[in-house]
Image (cartoon, helix red, strand yellow):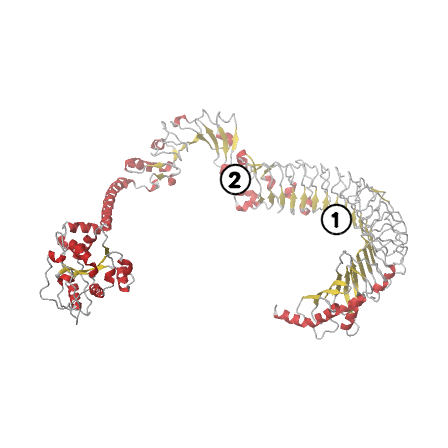
Amino acid sequence: MPAARARAAAAALPALALLVAALAGPLDTNVTYYDKADLSWPGPPQGCAPSGAVAHLQLECALPAGKLTLSTDLATYLTIACEPDESDRAGRFDCEEVYEHAAAARQGAPDKVLQSFAVVNCELPGALRCALALAGARDALTVVLRDVPTPLRPAHLAGLEEVKHLRIVNAGPNVTRVPYETLAVLPKLTRFYLGGGALQLEEGWKPELLHLETLELTQGNLATIPPRAFLGLPQLRNLSLWQNKIEKLSNDSLEGLPLLERLSLNGNLLSTLPRGLLLPTPRLKLLNLYGNVLSTLSSDLLSHLQFLEEVWLDNNNRTELRLEGAVFAGLAALRSLKLERCGVRALPAGLLRGARALRSLSLRGNRLRALPGNLLRGAHALHTLDLARNRIAQLPDDVFLGLSALRKLDLSNNLIANLSESLFSRVDLEDLSLSYNKLTMESGLKHFSPLRLMTTLRRLALRGNAVRTIMDDWRLFINLDTLDLSYNSINKLSDVNLQFLSESEVDLRHNNISVVSYFSVKLESLLRSKAKFLLDNNPFVCDCKMYNFIGLLRNPESAEGFKIDHAQCAGPPARVGELLADVPVDALRCGFQAPDCPADCDCAYHPASKSVELDCPTPPRAVPRPADFDATGVHLRLRSALNNLTAVPAGVRLVNLSRLGLTEAPAASVTLHNLTVDLSHNKLSNIPLALLNANCNVRLTGNEFACDCKHKDDIAEFRGHWSRVDDLATLQCRNGGLMVDVPVDRLCVMRDAIVLGVSLATAGLLVAMFVVLAYKYSTEIRLILRKFEWLDFLFAAKDMDGSEKAYDAFVSFSHHDDDFVQNVLVRRLESGRRPLRLCLHYRDWEIGGMIPEQIDYSVRESRRTIVVLSKAFLGSMWGREEFRAAHGLERVIVLLVGDALEAATQDKELRAYLTTNTYVHADDPLVWDRIRDAVRRTRPRPRPAPGAPAAPAAPAAPATPAAPAPADKLARPALDVQLRDGKLVNRY
């Protein structure tokens, strides 16, 4: 909640609490409020009356007498609505309960007068004045009792002296009489409304209500008006008795109403009115008799009412209403007369004589067949005349004579078939409706040609007639806004019909228009017309006759003059249902039959190409003359192949042989002038040079010509005929390029280049394949070459730094793997054509030497260190030392034995090494070849960076390395020595 609203709510709480205490006592009360502006409440409140902005409150209260809802703004109105009981009867409202609490809340007598005080659906047990204290008021100007079943008595309104308007709405069946005595306690009452109830009026009003001006007794069961029923109401000006059941009135029913101005008797059952009924009301201005069953009106019923301005007699059509004489004659003040739907068959000649002030006359919905010639004589002020929905077939030529003020005339829904040319010659009409008559508007007649109509008429409605064409005089109206010609019989429009001088909207929907054609005026002239034409729902035939019009619709500037959102084609059959706006202009044709059309051919005129089109299986003997169709030539479409163009008859300008699957073009044995041969979308591979040499024009799109060295001469010759090829820019070669881009002088060069390129590409592909295979199987290839000593000169037994080594490999292993090393590894690697020189600790180490020095010497004097990695090796301290020494010099070859890989990953150093280096498994079929290859391969060691320290020198070694052990030495068991004081005594 915004800050301002929160402050207002907090300020309103004292007043709300006071109202709750006043109404609820110990019972429940729900309070809501809303505001129109920021509230400003003083505190403490005086009598719950706010100062500043008006607050609107609504309280739902449960009192001992019943539940009710109270609504008020504490300034202008107060409404008390009771909740019905379980049997849906009106609730109760105990004024004493409200008054008791309100008196405690009120400080001093309230002095405010509300605009409105309403009680809804409540019984009235006592005075109502006490309830006004809730709003700090003592009185109200208007009291409304809605759905209150209790008959109103003086005690209910006692003390309300300011009431001017009392309304009793939906009085229940208990209300059977007008509360005469109760009204007497309201000295300032000027208007009384009583709706509903089973009323019965009494004779006269006692006491008199000298200030009452409006009395409304409506929507009840009032059946009779007794004589002098309204005596005692001398100031009454408005009397409404509508929607009752009054069947009869007497001459003195309205006696005592000399100032009455408005009398409403509509919606009753009156069949006649006595002649003297209105004599007591000489100042009557409005008489409303709508919806009765009147059968006659006497000639002198209204004659004395010189102030009468409006008479409403409409909807008395249950019987035929007869007018006896000049009923409305002499009424000099009469301005409006509604005599609608009354079944009137004839009008007296002098019916309106002397009605000089008459402005509006409606005779709609009667049974009139004719009008007297002098019916409107003297009605010089008549502005609106409604004669619609009658049976008028003919109008007198002078019926509108002298009606200089007439602006609106409605003659729709009659039987008028002809109009006199002088009928509207003396009127300045602005709105004329002749819809739903039988007018045909014969050509040559100018029904609306008077000069004055040319400038004044703004709306002309001719809907639903039998009009067949647009009249010339309609096009000349200068200020016309609307011309309604819908639902007529217009079947054709031309450019002349559409040339309007005004910016009018011409409704031509729902006619029989099949064509909109142009002949005498150029298309551009339509752009000067400012009218807009509605053309939907017409049976347009979308053929060549619509060519100019549909082409015009493609111009955005001219298309604005037509509304064709739903206009569809009704023919020819191929275009039925197609929207006019979507029809392609180039597709419009008009077919024709024999004798102009040759046998077995389909013939049509095509305006887009200004040609006569023939579709034939074979060339006909003769073709139609183009001049007979305003065409420039004949186009012949053949459905089968043609061998020689000499079979084409004279007069043909185009032979269409497209889409026939031709592989050869037709021959041309003679020179042909002004002939075009359409060979598009066939299967031609050779350029039709014979046709071009015969002076024919050709169309070749959609064929794939051979643009190669073999056809070099044809292409070169073709270049000299490019001017005869209509679609040169779209011709393509078989390889996808455009023919205009073919380099003729390089066609054969391209062939040679292609051969050379293919050869080189093939060779390159073979080389690439060899390289890929050599790279993929490089290891296998190297192993094979080395195995057979084909490339031994590439693999010198040198270390990576180029120095000679005493051993090829130092074997690091656990004594638990002696059997595998002696019987497998040594036997495999120290045999063959070029055996490896292996360093084995049990064979080549010096007895009693320091183990770290022996390890360092063995690693440095060997080109590689073969680590036999097994689970036993992982548990050997000296095996790890040997691995570190060899790993530091990048000379390690790891040979996995058994399932040592999983155990090796538990050691961080080995895991890091195995992650970044390759290794070989003893189960590999090529394991010994791979080891031999790895030992014999040399890689140059990177030179140290300038200033970097040199690699440490190898430890001193024995002057003469131990010679390799003899073969029988391999069978000796491993030495069992021990390490004491740094000397090698027992290795493992």
Residue 641: percent from the left, percent from the top? 40, 28
Residue at image coords 20%, 67% = 945
Residues tagged 1 and 2 counted as in contact (Cβ below 8 A): no
Type of amino acid under label 1: His
Res 951 seen here: no
Q: Is residue 655 above or below residue 911?
A: above
Q: Is residue 553 above or below residue 856?
A: above
Residue occupying image coordinates x 90% and y 59%: 206
Question: Which mark sits nearer the N-terminus, 1 or 2?
Answer: 1
> Which image quadrant for residue 74?
bottom right
Please state the horizontal and vertical placement of residue 858, each as a whole percent of the image.
15, 64
Residue at label 1? 383
Secondary element at tag 1: loop
**Location of the N terminus (image quadrant):** bottom right
Front position among marks 1 and 2: 2
Marker disc for residue 583: 2
276 lies above or below 66: above
Q: Which of 843 and 52 is in front in this view?
A: 843
Question: Dot 1: within a 10 Å radius of its alpha carbon, few (fewer than 14), some, or many (20 or more) residues?
Answer: some
Q: Which residue lies furthest to the left in this view?
A: 960
